[in-house]
């Protein structure tokens, strides 16, 4: 019936165009629905991770440090969703209670990178000259060193501990924020309203705060959302290598490290905590890119 109406309303030569437009509209709607579904699932995953960190006893009421030796190395079941480890401790409970340390270290790392990198980029782009050259050479040095290698060097110098891991990861991410902030400041600094503010005699620090920084922070904030996933992965990697919390305190990376000796007999000790990390990292990246695309518009 619909094809008949189309034939009556349009010339024969325009029928392929109408069908092509209809197919493209259907494809665009399907793509939008799929993107929204992925974004919704990513939001749910991150909300669950935040809930684990803030209210661990609400999601897992057991003791993450105590186990039942008679129930050691049991596979996933209704009683133990993620199975048990070599000491009979519930792996799901340890994952939930380990979210607090892992996500707190991630937030501290991203916060350090955001604040320090933004200040470096703001000063470099606003002042220019020799200061710009010196700061950008420092940023180039940081960018030339792989992030994980730089984090390892810093945490070795600072010492073991979750907060030291957070500081090391934060410093390794500073250069990314500095570059983005500098590019935005250079773009905004040439705007007419900034030049008008200087022409009216407004002090330079007031212009930076009211006009330059206010119109430059959006891409940097979007970058913080994207780098959150990378920070989760970096913190977990350093924890896996033994630089994080001291056992038996649960932490996502250390949980995978504890289970690698039992990988053949108890795959769930490494696989399921690893899947939790993967889900959080991918969800953070998806939401970060959605924020970045929206700010770019």
Image (cartoon, helix red, strand yellow):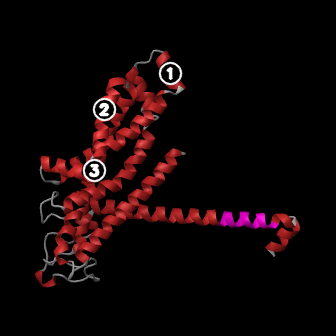
Specify the quadrant of the image occupied by residue 268.
bottom left
Label 2 vs 3, first from the N-terminus = 2
- Is 161 a magenta residue? no
Answer yes or no: do the residues labelled 2 and 1 have beta carbons within 8 Å? no
Q: Against 222, is 240 above or below?
A: below
Query: SS class of the residue under badge 2?
Result: helix
Q: Is residue 191 left or right of residue 98?
A: right
Which of the two discs, 3 and 1, labels the residue nearer the N terminus? 3
Residue 205 image position (x, y, % from top left):
37, 23
**Residue 106 drawn at (x, y percent):** 28, 53
Residue 66 appears anywhere in the view: yes
Residue denoted by label 1: 195
Query: From mark 2 to mark 3, how far is it between C-alphas?
Result: 19 Å
Q: Which residue is mark 2?
A: 135
Is label 3 or label 1 in front? 3
Which of discs 2 and 1 lies nearer the camera? The answer is 2
Gap in Å between the C-alphas at discs 3 and 1? 39 Å
Displayed quadrant of residue 174? top left
Which mark, by number, is residue 146? Answer: 3
């Amino acid at each position: 019936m619909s094809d008949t109406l189309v034939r009556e309303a349009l010339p024969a030569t325009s029928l392929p165009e109408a069908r092509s437009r209809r197919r493209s509209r259907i494809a665009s709607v399907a793509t939008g629905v799929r993107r929204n579904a992925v974004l919704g699932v990513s939001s749910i995953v991150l909300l669950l991770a935040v809930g684990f960190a803030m209210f661990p006893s609400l999601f897992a009421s057991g003791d993450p440090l105590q186990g039942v030796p008679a129930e050691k190395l049991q596979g996933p079941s209704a009683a133990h969703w993620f199975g048990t480890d070599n000491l009979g401790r519930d792996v799901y409970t340890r994952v939930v209670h380990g979210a607090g340390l892992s996500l707190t270290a991630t937030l501290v790392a991203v916060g350090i990178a955001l604040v320090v990198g933004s200040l470096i980029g703001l000063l470099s782009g606003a002042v220019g000259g020799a200061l710009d050259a010196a700061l950008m050479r420092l940023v180039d040095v940081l960018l030339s060193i792989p992030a994980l290698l730089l984090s390892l060097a810093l945490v070795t110098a600072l010492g073991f501990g979750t907060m030291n891991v957070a500081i090391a990861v934060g410093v390794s991410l500073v250069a990314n924020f500095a570059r983005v902030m500098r590019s935005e400041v250079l773009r905004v600094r040439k705007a007419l309203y900034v030049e008008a503010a200087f022409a009216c005699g407004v002090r330079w620090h007031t212009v930076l705060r009211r006009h330059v920084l206010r119109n430059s922070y959006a891409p940097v904030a979007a970058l913080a959302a994207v780098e959150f996933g990378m920070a989760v992965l970096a913190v977990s990697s350093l924890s896996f290598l033994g630089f994080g919390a001291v056992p038996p305190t649960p932490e996502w990376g250390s949980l995978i490290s504890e289970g690698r000796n039992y990988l053949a007999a108890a795959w769930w000790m490494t696989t399921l905590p690893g899947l939790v990390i993967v889900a959080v990292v991918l969800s953070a990246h998806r939401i970060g890119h959605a924020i970045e695309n929206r700010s770019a518009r």
